[in-house]
Image (tube, rainbow, N blue to C red):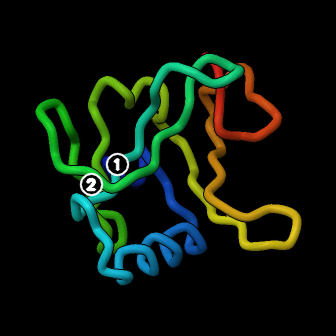
Amino acid sequence: MENLEEALVKFTPGALKQLRALRNTGNLEGGKIRIGVEGGGCAGLNYILQYDQEKPGDIEMNIDGILILLNKAHGLYLSGITVDYQDGLSARGFTFENPNAKTTCGCGSSFGI
């Protein structure tokens, strides 16, 4: 059975490797990684993946040694999401596979529910 962290948000080995590499650069602004959503983008909501400090209403998850923050209210939009990192010639960066998204934009960073 999955634990709470695995049920809410999944990070592929490639995404975890990239997050560790970023963490090890020593440029942590907050020490923890926030995943969330914000209004905007061509489909209505944008994904957030950034360094941040813990705030009231956050869930803190330890996913394979990386501390991840998620605002409880964003769980509705992100439950079951898989975050990957692509490092190819035609695509580079974090990608989001969201089973809750009803619409997505062409760039993959915006979605609608």
In the depicted view, which residue is nearer to us: 27 or 12?
A: 27
Whole-number angstrom distance, CA of label 2 to CA of label 1 = 10 Å
Instruction: Give the amino acid type for the residue marked by disc 2 in the picture.
Output: Met
Report whether 22 appears left or right of 70: right
- The image quadrant where one finds the N terminus is bottom left
Secondary element at image label 2: strand
Which label was assigned to residue 47? none
- The image quadrant where one finds the C terminus is top right
Quarter assignment of residue 76: top left
* 24 versus 27 height, above or below: below
* Residue where numbered disc 1 is placed: 34
Residue 48 in the image: state x and y as whole percent. Answer: 46, 41
Q: Residue at x 74, y 21 (%)?
A: 103
Q: Residue at x 35, y 83 (%)?
A: 24
Report whether 35 appears left or right of 84: left
* 74 versus 65 height, above or below: above
Quarter assignment of residue 97: top right
Q: How crowded is mark 2: few (under 14 residues within 10 Å), some or many (20 or more)?
A: some
Residue 22 in the image: state x and y as whole percent. Answer: 43, 74
Residue 44 in the image: state x and y as whole percent. Answer: 61, 17
Report whether 79 appears left or right of 66: right
* Residue where numbered disc 2 is placed: 61
Instruction: Give the amino acid type for the residue marked by disc 1 in the picture.
Output: Arg
Task: Say whether disc 2 or disc 1 marks the residue closer to the N-terminus.
Answer: 1
Report whether 69 appears left or right of 103: left
Quarter assignment of residue 98: top right
Q: Residue at x 51, y 60 (%)?
A: 11
